[in-house]
């Protein structure tokens, strides 16, 4: 399936310059398994003068683990080319705060780097919830108890699902909803498309021209907040042939390779 623009749209393609914000899960890989053609597609973008900034709502992997996964996928990347919801969440936590985290190593790394003190139970100043497989009744009880005792509730992101090669599994948003329901608190959410992530992206790049992602509610909304084009790829959580996505993308493609091929083809004809 090749890229296509909505009827009457003139927003795509953007100019061949600036940065593209590119999601990871569902765009570059599925559960760490590289999607076919991504390395060549990103290489062609760079050759065309487009600088990728990889932005993920997945707070579980550390920066080192993400860089290693990108390298295994054939994508060269440095720490400054990578932004995570774990990093965004850490900007909401004051240095020295006692943090009870229901999250994996990526979030723990970002919180510690920001000066937080990690604790396993109350008292806590902040409860941070990210994607984790280590989520059970006892941890839910500890988190809800801390929030009811006065801790702020922060979610790395509120994606309800997470794409894998074998289908969707519960995402961080599902876990966050459980803590919010049990505690009666309304969470602050850091990841795409929320302000902490927007501010972090803008601190890294001042020339974003497009957002590429597989989830309109996060990637599309992020593009609209940034005031740039949104390219939807169908290799992740959004299947083809379903109801119209909201917000509507400026272009749609089967995957990143198809998107880049059409973008460069369209650019060569202009």
Image: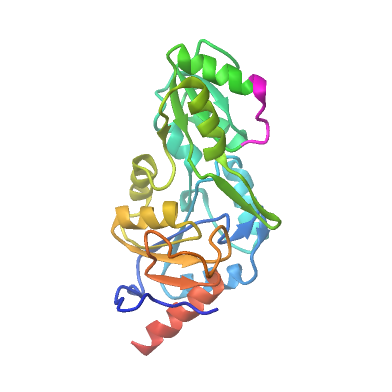
Taking the image as shown, residue 257 lies to the left or right of residue 11, namely right
7 or 114: nearer the viewer: 7
Taking the image as shown, residue 131 lies to the left or right of residue 246, namely right
Can you give x and y, in whole percent of width and height, for residue 266 in the image? 40, 84
32 or 127: nearer the viewer: 127
User: What range is drawn magenta here?
Assistant: 132-138
Q: How many numbered discs, if any?
A: 0
104 or 173: nearer the viewer: 173
Above or below, 232 relative to 15: above
Q: How is the image coloured?
A: rainbow
Can you give x and y, in whole percent of width and height, for residue 198 in the image? 35, 46
Quarter of the figure with residue 30: bottom right
Q: Residue at x 57, y 30 (%)?
A: 108
Magenta span: predominant SS is loop
Instruction: Specify whether residue 152 is in view.
Output: yes
> Would residue 266 be counted in the magenta stretch?
no
Above or below, 112 relative to 251: above
Above or below, 235 relative to 87: below
Q: Residue at x 42, y 14 (%)?
A: 150
Q: Residue furthest right?
A: 166
Q: Residue furthest front?
A: 243
Can you give x and y, in whole percent of width and height, for residue 61 in the image? 61, 42
> Would residue 134 be counted in the magenta stretch?
yes
* Quarter of the C terminus within the rendering: bottom left
Above or below, 240 relative to 186: below
Quarter of the figure with residue 11: bottom left
* Quarter of the N terminus within the rendering: bottom right
Q: Residue at x 36, y 57 (%)?
A: 223
Instruction: Specify whether residue 119 is in view.
Output: no
Can you give x and y, in whole percent of width and height, for residue 201 in the image? 38, 49
23 or 69: nearer the viewer: 23
């Amino acid at each position: 399936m090749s890229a296509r623009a909505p009827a009457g749209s003139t927003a795509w393609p953007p100019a061949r310059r600036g940065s593209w914000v590119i999601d990871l899960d569902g765009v570059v890989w599925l559960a760490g398994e590289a999607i076919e053609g991504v390395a060549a597609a990103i290489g062609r973008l760079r050759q065309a003068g487009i600088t990728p900034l990889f932005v993920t709502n997945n707070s579980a992997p550390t920066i080192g683990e993400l860089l290693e996964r990108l390298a295994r996928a054939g994508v060269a990347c440095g720490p400054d080319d990578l932004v995570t919801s774990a990093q965004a969440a850490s900007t909401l936590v004051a240095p020295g705060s006692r943090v009870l985290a229901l999250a994996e190593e990526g979030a723990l790394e970002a919180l510690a780097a920001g000066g937080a003190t990690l604790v396993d139970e109350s008292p806590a100043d902040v409860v941070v919830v990210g994607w984790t497989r280590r989520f059970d009744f006892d941890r839910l009880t500890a988190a809800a108890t801390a929030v009811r005792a006065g801790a702020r509730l922060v979610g790395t992101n509120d994606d309800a699902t997470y794409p894998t090669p074998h289908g969707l599994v519960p995402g961080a948003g599902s876990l966050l909803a459980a803590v919010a329901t049990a505690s009666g608190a309304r969470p602050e959410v850091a990841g795409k498309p929320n302000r902490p992530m927007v501010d972090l992206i803008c601190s890294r790049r001042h020339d974003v021209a497009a957002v590429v992602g597989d989830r309109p509610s996060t990637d599309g909304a992020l593009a609209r907040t940034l005031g740039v084009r949104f390219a939807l790829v169908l290799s992740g959580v959004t299947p083809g042939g379903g109801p119209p996505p909201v917000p509507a993308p400026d272009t749609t493609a089967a995957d990143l390779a198809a998107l880049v091929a059409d973008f460069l083809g369209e650019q060569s004809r202009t």
